[in-house]
Image (spheres, rainbow, N blue to C red):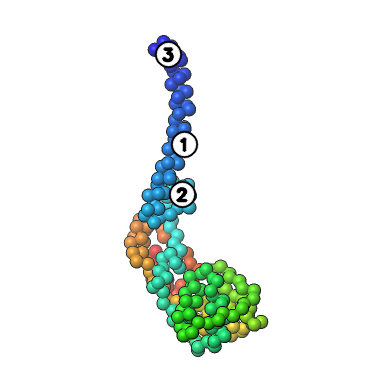
Amino acid sequence: PRDLSIAINSFTAVLIIACPCAVALAIPFIFGNVLRILGKNHFYLKNTQVIEALDHINHIVFDKTGTLTDRSKLSITYLGSPLKEEERAALLALSQNSNHPISQAIHQYVQEQTETPENLVALNKWREDEGAGVQAVWNGIPVRLGSAAYITAPVPEGWAAQKGTYLQVGEQIRAGFVIQHGMRRGIQNVFTYFRELGNMYLLSGDNEREKANFFPL
């Protein structure tokens, strides 16, 4: 009331100092609250920067195995003659440490088909090639478990059309596993929702045998 210039300077100082601080404090609280709400609905983001980016989505890329598919609904068809006991033990040892859902499914399938628990054999030079398969050396013999593109031996005639996962012992394909995935419950509603946001794509290291189950995305 006494000096207009002092009043204007004070008013300006308050705006300059307080407003950015209020915004700087408000944004983390808002983003934190959004993450909490999304988390309660089982939607998890890696960081808060993604929240603003969500508004600009125009392409949606889905992973397939374990994301769109339900591991509990998976079925396996076995190809080939029965494995010898030591080969079965080598296969279990080869697949048990793999993180890939298909390797884990094969490991569980072989265990369920075995009447008595197998004593896992020792493997050397075990290696997992992400998205392709696993390999190791067993009693001096190279063994591989993976897709047709991963193994080095020719797939038996008639098996290749199945597009499965194959067990190679030495230079011979000893078994094949044809995986049939089951879709997660409610996944069609997910497709319907995201189709309105933009173009949808499927990203998978698997073969195209099940393409008809997912397309057109």
> In this rendering, does residue 130 appear at all?
yes
- Position of 7 with respect to 149 (left or right) is left
- Position of 90 with respect to 54 (left or right) is right
As rendered, which of 123 and 174 lies closer to the eye?
A: 123
Q: Residue at 44% of width from left, 79% of height from top? A: 76
How many other residues sit within 10 Å of disc 1, few (<14), some (14-19) or many (≥20)?
A: few
Tell me whether circle 2 and circle 1 mark residues in contact (CB < 8 Å): no
Q: Residue at 57% of width from left, 85% of height from top? A: 86
**Could you tell me how far apart the alpha carbons at marks 1 and 3 are, in whole angstroms?**
30 Å
Q: Earlier in the sequence, mark 1 or mark 3?
A: 3
Residue pointed to by mark 2: 50
**Could you tell me how far apart the alpha carbons at marks 3 and 2 are, in whole angstroms?**
46 Å
Q: Earlier in the sequence, mark 3 or mark 2?
A: 3
How many other residues sit within 10 Å of disc 2, few (<14), some (14-19) or many (≥20)?
A: few
Q: Secondary structure at mark 2?
A: helix
Mark 2: amino acid: Val
Quadrant in which the N terminus appears = top left
Residue 25 screen position, x and y as percent: 45, 37
The answer to which image quadrant residue 134 occupies is: bottom right
Residue pointed to by mark 1: 24
Quadrant in which the C terminus appears = bottom left
Tell me whether circle 3 and circle 2 mark residues in contact (CB < 8 Å): no
Tell me whether circle 1 and circle 3 mark residues in contact (CB < 8 Å): no
Q: Earlier in the sequence, mark 2 or mark 1?
A: 1
> In this rendering, does residue 151 appear at all?
no
Mark 3: amino acid: Leu
Mark 1: amino acid: Ala
Compared to 186, does 145 lie above or below?
A: below
How many other residues sit within 10 Å of disc 3, few (<14), some (14-19) or many (≥20)?
A: few
Residue pointed to by mark 3: 4
